[in-house]
């Protein structure tokens, strides 16, 4: 049975959008921030099994992190 779990996951995202209506359609500028606390979140864990020079079984783990802090901006158009 598995006795180990991944660390707690914590992330806060923010998004701001503004809609402007024109005769030809819509324009929507936006600003987004992902993981504003820059908390290190482990997405998955990989396991590798090896036998060392003394024929001992060795298990190593590699943690794979998810998003760091990311900021984005852009404009969406609809017509």
Image (cartoon, grey):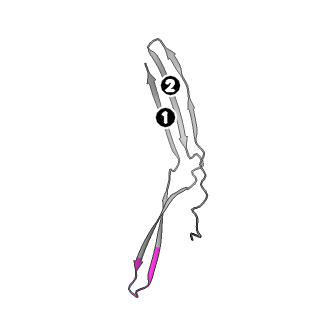
Q: Which residue is mark 2?
A: 28
Q: Where does residue 10 sit, x and y in percent of width and height?
A: 61, 52
Residue at x-position 53% and y-position 34%:
31
Residue at x-position 58% and y-position 68%:
4
Q: Where does residue 13 sit, x and y in percent of width and height?
A: 58, 42
Task: From this view, report whether residue 60 is shown above or below residue 43.
Answer: below
Image quadrant containing the C terminus: top left
Q: Residue furthest left?
A: 53
Q: Residues within 10 Å of mark 1 (few under 14, many from 20)?
A: few
The residue segment tinted magenta is 50-59
Which of disc 2 and disc 1 is earlier in sequence? 2
Q: Where does residue 15 sit, x and y in percent of width and height?
A: 57, 35
Image quadrant containing the N terminus: bottom right
Task: From this view, report whether residue 64 is shown above or below residue 76.
Answer: below
Marks 1 and 2, how far apart at CA: 11 Å
Q: Nearer the viewer, residue 33 or 59?
A: 59
Residue 24 relative to residue 3: left or right: left
Q: Where does residue 37 sit, x and y in percent of width and height?
A: 60, 49
Residue 33 relative to residue 46: left or right: right
Residue at x-position 49% and y-position 59%:
44
Q: Residue furthest front?
A: 1
Q: Which residue is mark 1?
A: 73
Q: Nearer the viewer, residue 60 or 39?
A: 60
Is 55 inside the magenta-drawn segment? yes
Q: Nearer the viewer, mark 1 or mark 2?
A: 2
């Amino acid at each position: 049975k598995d006795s180990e779990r991944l660390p707690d996951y914590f992330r806060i995202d923010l998004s701001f959008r503004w809609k402007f209506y024109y005769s030809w359609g819509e324009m929507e500028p936006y600003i987004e921030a992902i993981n504003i606390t820059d908390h290190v979140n482990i997405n998955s864990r990989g396991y590798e099994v090896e036998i060392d020079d003394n024929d001992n079984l060795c298990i190593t783990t590699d943690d794979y992190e998810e998003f760091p802090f990311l900021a984005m901006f852009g404009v969406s158009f609809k017509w």
